Each structure stands twice: as structure tokens, then as C-alpha cells.
Amino acid sequence: MAFIILSVLARALWRLEGKLFKKIYLRDAVLLALIGLTIIYGAYVAGLKAGLIYNTFPLMEGQWLPNEWNFYHPVWTNFINNPATVQWLHRLLALATVTYSTILWIKHGATYRLITIKIVIQVGLGISTLLLQVPLAVALLHQAWAMVVWMIALKTAWVKK
């Protein structure tokens, strides 16, 4: 909900500043969806304290997918209640986001350079948070930087240059 409110306020501010808005391309909608889902799963990671387990990267204690990924039944509940599965999904979404953003930068040029750099920093903060076993300062920086990434992605998608 906080990101929706932030988005509405940002759009209103940009409108007050006289910014012109553009049609959102599918590529931008996909990028926003990936960033949004990654942020949502980041909230699940924080809420379930999932960052306190599997403090290795890129593997999760030597495995790509943790053994207990389907511990709960019905299976779909693992995607919101199982700390191991939630952490795995957050990692997967983060890597998909940085990969997709990099592809956009390569294909469409400088428009996507800033957002890609910010996403790479975010992934680095996330990995650091995990490997350092979630020190509060680094975890808070990782969460705050997610807002920076979201705002730059919105501006990239919405505002004409």
C-alpha cells in the first residue's frame, strides 16, 4: 500500500512540475511488475525473518532450491508462508529483474542505464544483507533503496525526457 501511495504522490508531484507523461510501453510495465513483485517478496522475507536462514549466495547451502520449499500443504501456501521458499523467490525475482533491466539497457540504450545501475546496487545490498546475516543498518538500507529503485523505474516508465 505504501508503494501505491508513493506512486500516486510522485505522479502528482511530477504533474505539478509540468512533466509530460508518455504511454507506458510493455517493456516498462514488465520491468515495473518485476520490481514490484521483488519488493513484495522482500516484505515477505522481512516479515518471516527469512533472511536469517540460508546465509549463502548464490546457492542456498549448496542447493539452487532448498529441500523444504514444499513443506506446507497445500503447496501454494509455501509461496507466502515458507521462509525458505519466500527467500528463494525473492532471490529469483531479483536476478530476473537485474537481467531484464540489463537487456533493456543493451537493447534500448541510455534510457535504462540509471535504473539498471540502481538495481545492481540493490542486488548487491540484498546479497550483503544476506551474507552478513541481516545487520539492521544494511537491511534498512536495502529496504530504503528499494524505494529509490521503484521511483526511478516509475519515472523511466511515465515521464517524457
Image (spheres, helix red, strand yellow):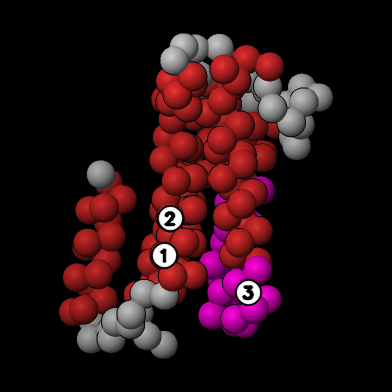
Under circle 1, the secondary element is helix
Q: Residue at x 23, y 82 (%)?
A: 17
Q: Which residue is mark 2?
A: 33
Type of secondary structure dominating the magenta stretch: helix
Instruction: Between label 3 and label 2, give the one nearer the viewer.
Output: 2
Q: Which residue is mark 3?
A: 105
Q: Which residue is mark 1?
A: 29
| Residue 67 falls in image quadrant | top right
Question: Label 3: few (<14), some or many (≥20) within 10 Å?
Answer: some
> Residue 28's spot in the image, x, y percent?
45, 69
Gap in Å between the C-alphas at discs 2 and 1? 6 Å
Q: Residue at x 41, y 75 (%)?
A: 25
What type is the residue that disc 2 sits on?
A: Ala
Gap in Å between the C-alphas at discs 1 and 3? 15 Å
Is 97 contained in the magenta span? no
Tell me if residue 66 comes above or below residue 115 in the rendering.
Answer: above
Under circle 2, the secondary element is helix
Q: Quadrant of the N terminus?
A: top left
Image position of 132 (left or right of 16): right
Q: Quadrant of the C terminus?
A: bottom left
**Magenta residue span:** 103-124
Q: Which badge, 3 or 2, comes first in the chain's sequence?
A: 2
Instruction: Between label 1 and label 3, give the one nearer the viewer.
Output: 1
What type is the residue that disc 1 sits on?
A: Ala
Under circle 3, the secondary element is helix
Do the residues bearing badges 2 and 1 touch, measured as CB atoms within 8 Å?
yes
Image position of 126 (left or right of 26): right
What type is the residue that disc 3 sits on?
A: Trp
